[in-house]
Amino acid sequence: MNTNLFYGTRSNVVEVVDIEREIASWMRHYRQYVVVFRSDDYLPAVKLGLSAYLRGQAFDDCLDELEQSYLRVRGSSRLDWYEAQPVARAAWTRLMEQQTGKGARRPAEQCGLDNAA
């Protein structure tokens, strides 16, 4: 069994997600758009979005819970919740789009970073 695979239950269907692949995708693309932060600054928000998706939570329905979780897990990330929340949402959305067959955009495009300096 691949230890990088995580299983979520969004409905009666069990979904398999390669978390390492998702994180690697984010780490490959983030620097093209925002050079102010390090990849480690984004990682807690990305993981939080992925985790919310795998637990079957609708992103908007759990914003308060996600904010509290972020404050606990952010570690040395320089992003405050208002900077991290769009990244977490984009990670959640990317998985949702992949699982529903809507296709996936690059991670930075999903959180509005495609025009950032």
Image (spheres, grey):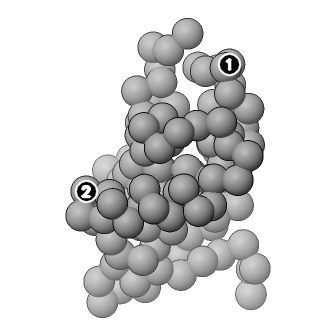
Q: Amino acid at mark 1?
A: Val
Foreground residue, 91 or 15? 91
Q: CA distance from mark 1 to mark 2?
A: 28 Å
Lower position in the chain sequence, tag 1 or tag 2: 1
Q: Residue at x 67, y 20 (%)?
A: 36
Where residue 83 appears, as percent x and y from the top left, is 48, 35
Residue 69 sits above or below residue 89 on the image: below
Q: Residue at x 31, y 65 (%)?
A: 62
Where residue 54 appears, as percent x and y from the top left, is 46, 73
Work out which quarter of the rendered image holds the N terminus and state it.
bottom right
Q: Answer with left or right where residue 53 lies relative to residue 73.
A: left
Image label count:
2
Foreground residue, 104 or 36? 36
Residue 25 sits above or below residue 62 on the image: above
Foreground residue, 58 or 13? 58
| Residue placed under numbered mark 2 in the picture | 60
Q: Residue at x 63, y 31 (%)?
A: 30
Work out which quarter of the rendered image holds the C terminus and state it.
top right
| Residue placed under numbered mark 1 in the picture | 35
- The label shown at residue 25 is none
Quadrant in which residue 34 is drawn: top right
Q: Residue at x 65, y 75 (%)?
A: 5
